[in-house]
Amino acid sequence: MPAFLRRWVALEGHEAALRQELSFIHQTYTRKSPHVVESLMYREHFLGSEFIGLVIYADAGLETKERRQALARLDEVAAAHARFSTPSLRVELVAEFVTSPHVTPYGIAGLLTCQPAFAAEVASRLRALTEDLVERLRPARMLVGEVIDTPGLFFVLGDSSYPVDLDRYLQSSLHRQHLVAVESLLVAPTRWFSLDPVWRYVKAGGEGT
């Protein structure tokens, strides 16, 4: 199923307006399109200015009027309220781990960048590392994706029922083990940040939150 990632960073003073607009668009167009399988949106926890959205479609949903309307509206909102934004980037989901089907109040994200030539190896190592994280930390869910439209860019998205202590993880021996596994293949330090889930819709569940 086609999946797309999008990111925004709000202009100073526009954080609340950007959140409100993005939430409204996700809610409105998710419900209007029968082809949306899943729709997720998160806000960076501490500063509250950065947002990440992920939408998964059935194949038939890519050329619909609803999707074109949603993309056009997202472009308008980005122009009005964001100092940085990406277009809708096609992604391939490399792995998904689910331990709980319930909606959770906390999240985590990681952004990793490697040379495109090493992408297959990084994907393989990330699957193993994420499986280890899931086993040890028991998040509700973790997704690993490769951004096809930006070769060499990977992301990890996780949902949790409890606050994620990133500082503790980044200072732990577990993080050092994970770093050793992929560091030599990366061209920049991995960026980790805590997230607040803003919107989640799963077609099987029928409702967003």
Image (cartoon, rainbow, N blue to C red):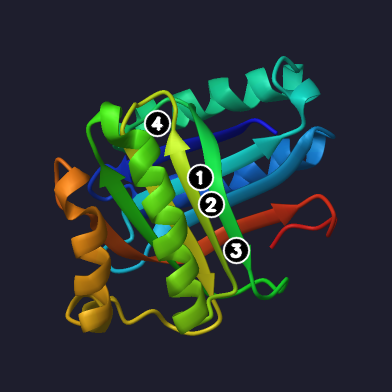
Q: CA distance from mark 2 to mark 3?
A: 18 Å
Does residue 72 lie above or below 157 as drawn?
above
Amino acid identity at mark 3: Phe
The answer, for residue 57, to whether it is visible in the render is yes
* Residue that numbered label 1 is attached to: 53
| Camera-side residue of 14 and 188 | 188
Cβ atoms under marks 4 and 1 closer than 8 Å: no
For the N terminus, the image quarter is top right
The amino acid type, in three-letter code, at marker 4 is Ala
Q: Residues within 10 Å of mark 2 (few under 14, many from 20)?
A: many
Q: Position of residue 200 (x, y in %)?
A: 65, 57
Q: CA distance from mark 3 to mark 4?
A: 31 Å
Q: How dense is the environment of label 3, judged by Cα within 10 Å: few (below 14), some, or many (20 and up)?
A: some
Instruction: Name the kind of residue labelled 2 in the image.
Output: Met
For numbered disc 1, what is the local secondary structure?
strand
Q: Nearer the viewer, residue 78 or 186?
A: 186
Q: Quadrant of the C terminus?
A: bottom right
Q: Which residue is mark 3?
A: 97
Q: Quadrant of residue 2?
A: top right
Q: Which residue is mark 4?
A: 78
Mark 2 or mark 4, which is nearer the start of the sequence? 2
